[in-house]
């Protein structure tokens, strides 16, 4: 099993920044890719960013140029640096990892962008 614990969400004004963190524990060796999804009220969950074990990254078009995903394999942690935040970025953000047996999600952390 793999357990994920997220932190770093909160309330921020438009144009501000937040950094989300997600620490993985358990069967770490089973993890390949790590990433973040989000779900806004009344909307479907969407992928935000993904990073593979070699550091290759993928971003949703809506966050390109504003968000950066990176990982620290020593600390078993994936980060999402979010800059130039917009009200439409308001959502619950879920850490996600791909393991040898499937996807595992964290419990989610709320990000609210509002003045």
Image (spheres, helix red, strand yellow):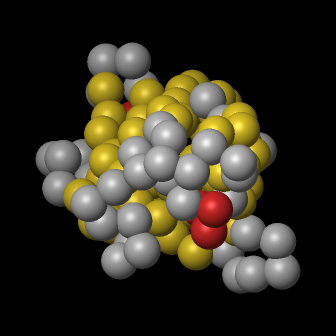
The count of marks equals: 0
Task: Tell me if residue 68 can be seen.
Answer: yes
Residue 61 located left or right of residue 105 = left
Please say whether residue 30 is visible from this viewpoint: no
**Side of 100 where 5 appears, left or right:** right
Specify the quadrant of the image occupied by residue 70.
Answer: top left
- Horizontally, residue 66 falls left or right of residue 97, namely left
Seen from this angle, which residue lies furthest top? Answer: 75
Which of these two is toward me, 95 or 9?
Answer: 9
- Extreme residue toward the front, this view: 115
State the image coordinates of residue 44 (x, y, percent, origin top left): 71, 81
The vertical placement of 15 against 91, above or below, is: above
Residue at x 32%, y 35% (from the top left corner): 71
Q: Nearer the viewer, residue 102 or 52?
A: 52
Task: Give residue 103's quadrant in the image.
Answer: bottom right
Instruction: Identify the residue shown where x is 51% and y is 70%.
Output: 47
The residue drawn where x is 39% and y is 18% is: 75
Q: Is residue 57 above or below residue 109?
A: below
Q: Residue at x 70, y 59 (%)?
A: 91
Q: Position of residue 10 (x, y in %)?
A: 71, 35
Q: The N terminus is located in which quarter?
A: top right
33 or 40, which lies in front? 40
Percent of width and height locating residue 84: 42, 51
Residue 25 percent location from the top left of the image: 57, 26
């Amino acid at each position: 099993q793999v357990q994920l614990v997220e932190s770093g969400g909160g309330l921020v004004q438009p144009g501000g920044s937040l950094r989300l963190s997600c620490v993985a524990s358990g069967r770490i060796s089973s993890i390949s890719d790590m990433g973040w999804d989000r779900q806004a009220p009344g909307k479907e969950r969407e992928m935000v960013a993904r990073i593979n074990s070699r550091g290759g990254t993928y971003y949703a078009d809506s966050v390109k140029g504003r968000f950066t995903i990176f990982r620290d394999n020593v600390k078993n942690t994936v980060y999402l640096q979010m800059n130039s935040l917009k009200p439409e970025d308001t959502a619950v953000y879920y850490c996600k990892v791909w393991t040898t047996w499937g996807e595992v999600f964290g419990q989610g952390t709320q990000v609210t962008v509002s003045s």
